[in-house]
Image (cartoon, rainbow, N blue to C red):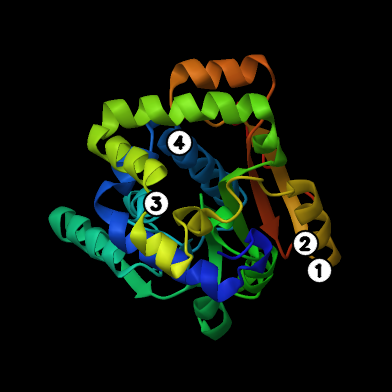
C-alpha cells in the first residue's frame, strides 16, 4: 500500500472513477442533504442576481457544472433558465443524470471526461464555472482551478463550494463526524452502513489487492484544504478573490448546531474571477 503522498494524479483519478461507478445509485441519497442543496441554490441565485443587477448576463450566458455528478448544479441552473454544460468522469453518474433529464424533459449537454483533461482541451468559454463538493476529490485542486480560469470569458466567475478546511483535522471534529456520518447512514441507507462496517472490519479484497482505498477518491477529505494558501496562490496567478467564506458542515441538524456552537468552520466556499469587479459587492452569507 502506498503512503498517501505517493498517490499521483492518475491514482486519484482512477480511484474516483472506480468509486463513483460503483456507488452512483446511492450517492445523492446519502451525501446530498436538504441543507447542502439549499445552500448551493442560495449562493448560485445570489451570484446570478448580482450579475443580472449589473447587466452582466446576456443571451450568450453559459455555465459549466464541473465534476457535476448527477447534475445538482445543472438542474438549478436549468430551472433558472440558463444554458449549462455538465462534465464528470463517472459513466454511471452520467447515466443517472441522463435518466433524470429524460424524466423531466431537460436538455443539458454533458461530457464524460476527467475535469482537468476537459479544461485543457476545452474550446468553450464560460461565464460561470461551479465546483460543488469537488476540490477535495482532486489531487491538485489549485492546478484545476487555474486551468478552469483559462476557460472563463472576460469577467467570468468560478464558484467552489462544499470543500473541507483544515479544521477537519481536529480531534473533536473527527469524533463527532464519525457519529454524524453513522446516524446519517442509519436513516438514509442502513444497508450502506452495514457495507461500510464490513469493509472496515474485513479488508475489501479489491482494495487490498489494488492498493486503492475508497478514501483516495476523497484525497483531501481527511486533512482538508488550506483555503487561505489557495487564495494566495490564485492571487499570485493574477486572479481575483471576489469573496471567501467558511461555514459549518455536517449531515444532521444536531451536529451542525454543535459545530456552530464551538465555531468549527469545517467547509469553505470561494468566488474567483479574472476581473476584480471593484464596484460590485457579492454579499453572501452561508451561516
Tell me where residue 12 appears, x and y as whole percent. Answer: 53, 67
Are the residues flagged by discs 3 and 4 in contact, CB closer than 8 Å?
Answer: no
**Which residue carries the number 2 mark?**
234
Q: Residues within 10 Å of mark 1 (few under 14, many from 20)?
A: few
State the SS at label 4: helix
Q: Nearer the viewer, residue 107 or 202?
A: 202
Q: Nearer the viewer, residue 252 or 205?
A: 205
State the SS at label 1: loop
**Which residue carries the number 1 mark?**
237
Tell me where residue 232 appears, x and y as whole percent. Answer: 83, 56
The residue at the point 61 percent across, 52 percent down is 220
Res 245 → quadrant? top right
Mark 2 → mark 3, Cα distance in angstroms: 40 Å
The residue at the point 66 percent across, 68 percent down is 6
The residue at the point 64 percent across, 14 percent down is 261
Are the residues flagged by discs 1 and 3 in contact, CB closer than 8 Å?
Answer: no
Tell me where residue 148 appears, x and y as whole percent. Answer: 61, 70
Residue at far front of view: 202
**Which residue carries the number 4 mark?**
36
Are the residues flagged by discs 1 and 2 in contact, CB closer than 8 Å?
Answer: yes
Left-right relation of 204 to 262: left
Amino acid at each position: 500500500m502506498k503512503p498517501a503522498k505517493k498517490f499521483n494524479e492518475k491514482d486519484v483519478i482512477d480511484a474516483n472513477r472506480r468509486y463513483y461507478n460503483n456507488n452512483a445509485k446511492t450517492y445523492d441519497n446519502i451525501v446530498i442533504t436538504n441543507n447542502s442543496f439549499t445552500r448551493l441554490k442560495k449562493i448560485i441565485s445570489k451570484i446570478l442576481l448580482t450579475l443580472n443587477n449589473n447587466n452582466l448576463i446576456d443571451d450568450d450566458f453559459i455555465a459549466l457544472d464541473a465534476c457535476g455528478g448527477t447534475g445538482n448544479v445543472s438542474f438549478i441552473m436549468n430551472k433558472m433558465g440558463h444554458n449549462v454544460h455538465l462534465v464528470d468522469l463517472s459513466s454511471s453518474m452520467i447515466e443517472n443524470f441522463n435518466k433524470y433529464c429524460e424524466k423531466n424533459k431537460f436538455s443539458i449537454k454533458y461530457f464524460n471526461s476527467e475535469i482537468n483533461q476537459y479544461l485543457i482541451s476545452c474550446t468553450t468559454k464560460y461565464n460561470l464555472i461551479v465546483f460543488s463538493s469537488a476540490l477535495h476529490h482532486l489531487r491538485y485542486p489549485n492546478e484545476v482551478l487555474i486551468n478552469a480560469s483559462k476557460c472563463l470569458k472576460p469577467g467570468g466567475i468560478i464558484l467552489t463550494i462544499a470543500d473541507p478546511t483544515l479544521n477537519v483535522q481536529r480531534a473533536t471534529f473527527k469524533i463527532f463526524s464519525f457519529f454524524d456520518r453513522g446516524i446519517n447512514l442509519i436513516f438514509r441507507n442502513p444497508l450502506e452502513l452495514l457495507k461500510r462496517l464490513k469493509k472496515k472490519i474485513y479488508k475489501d479484497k479489491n482494495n487490498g489487492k489494488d492498493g486503492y482505498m475508497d478514501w483516495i477518491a476523497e484525497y483531501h477529505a481527511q486533512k482538508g484544504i488550506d483555503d487561505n494558501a489557495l487564495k494566495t496562490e490564485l492571487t499570485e496567478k493574477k486572479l481575483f478573490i471576489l469573496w471567501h467564506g467558511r461555514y459549518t458542515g455536517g449531515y444532521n441538524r444536531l451536529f451542525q448546531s454543535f459545530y456552530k456552537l464551538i465555531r468549527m468552520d469545517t467547509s469553505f466556499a470561494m468566488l474567483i474571477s479574472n476581473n476584480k469587479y471593484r464596484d460590485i459587492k457579492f454579499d453572501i452569507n452561508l451561516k
